[in-house]
Amino acid sequence: MYSIRMIFTLIIIFVPILIYLLAPKEKLLKIILYVIVIYLLIYKIAEYYYHLVIEKNNQYPVEFSAVSYFLISIAVLTRWKGLREFASFLATLGGFFYAVANIIAPESFLHNTRFYLEMARLNHTLLFIAGLITNTIYFNRGYKYPYVIGITLVIIHAFIAKDIFNYSDTSYVIYEVVLATFLNDINLDYLFIKIVYYPLIVIVYLLLVKLFINMNTEYYYIS
C-alpha cells in the first residue's frame, strides 16, 4: 500500500511540473496527447463492448472519469473547442481525485480484480496527463460557459442511463453527489439538504472552475 501511495503522490507532484517544462515543445506534447487519447478511446470502447455484449453486464460509462475518457478523446480528435475546455477540466479532476483516493485509501479499490485494478490506475494516470496536456496546448481564456453546460449534460446523461439500465445501486460517485445519498447516515433533514447542500455543491464546482481557469491562464496558456 505504501508503494501505491508513493507512486500517486509522485504523479500528482511531478507530472504537472514535467508537462509545464515541456510546454514550449508543443509538437511533442501533441504527439503524446494523440497517442494517449487514441489508446483510451479504443480501450474504453473495447472494455464496454466486452461488459455489455459478451458479459451481458449493464455497465455503462456514467461516472465523471468514465465519461471523461470519451469526452477528452472526442474533443481532441475532433478539435471541438468548447468541448475541449470542459473535457480537459473533467479529465484533470478525474485523474487528480483518483490519485488522491489511492493515496488516502488504496485498500478501497481492492474489490476489483487485479487486471481491472491495474488498468484503472494506468488509465486514470493517462487521463490526468491528457487533461493537463490539453490544458497546456489548447486552453482558451474566452470560454466559460462549457463548464456549466458540460456538467449539466454529464449529469443528465447519468440519470438517463440509470433509467435505461435500471440501476438500483446508486453507489457511483455521480449519484451519491447529486442525490446526496452519502449524507443518509448523518440523518440530515431533507430541507437542510435542499437549502444548504445543493447551493454549496454549486458554489464548490464554480470555485473549482474559477481555480482551473486562473491556473491555466497563469501557468499553462502558451499561445
Image (tube, grey):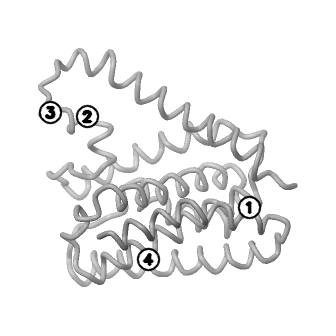
Where 150 falls versus 115 (above or below)?
Answer: above
Instruction: Give the residue displayed 52% in from the left and 66% down from the top.
Output: 10
Judge left or right: residue 63 versus residue 179: right
Q: Residue at x 77, y 43 (%)?
A: 218
Disc 2 to disc 3, how far (Cα)? 8 Å
Q: Amino acid at mark 2?
A: Ala
Q: In this rendering, which labeled residue sits more in front, label 2 or label 1? A: 1
What's the distance in space between the residues labelled 1 and 4, CA to CA? 30 Å
Q: Is 4 placed above or below 172 here?
A: below
Nearest to the eye among marks 4 and 2: give it.
2
Residue at image mark 4: 45
Residue 142, image quadrant: top right
Residue drawn at (77%, 69%) of the image? 22
**Disc 2 secondary structure class:** loop
CB of mark 1 within 8 Å of CB of mark 3? no
Disc 1 marks a residue whose amino acid type is Tyr
Label ID, residue 184:
3
Tell me which label, 1 or 4, sits earlier in the chain: 1
Distance between the alpha carbons at the discs numbered 2 and 1: 37 Å
Q: Which residue is tagged 2?
A: 180
N-terminal-most mark, 2 or 1: 1
Closer-to-camera residue (35/11): 11
Q: Amino acid at mark 3?
A: Asn
Mark seen at residue 20: 1
Measured Cα–Cα span from mark 4 to mark 2? 30 Å
Neighbours of disc 4 within 10 Å: few (<14), some (14-19), many (20+): few
Q: Please tell me which of labels 1 and 3 falls first in the chain.
A: 1
Mark 3, Cα crowd under 10 Å, few <14 / some 14-19 / many 20+, is few
Quarter placement of the C terminus: bottom right
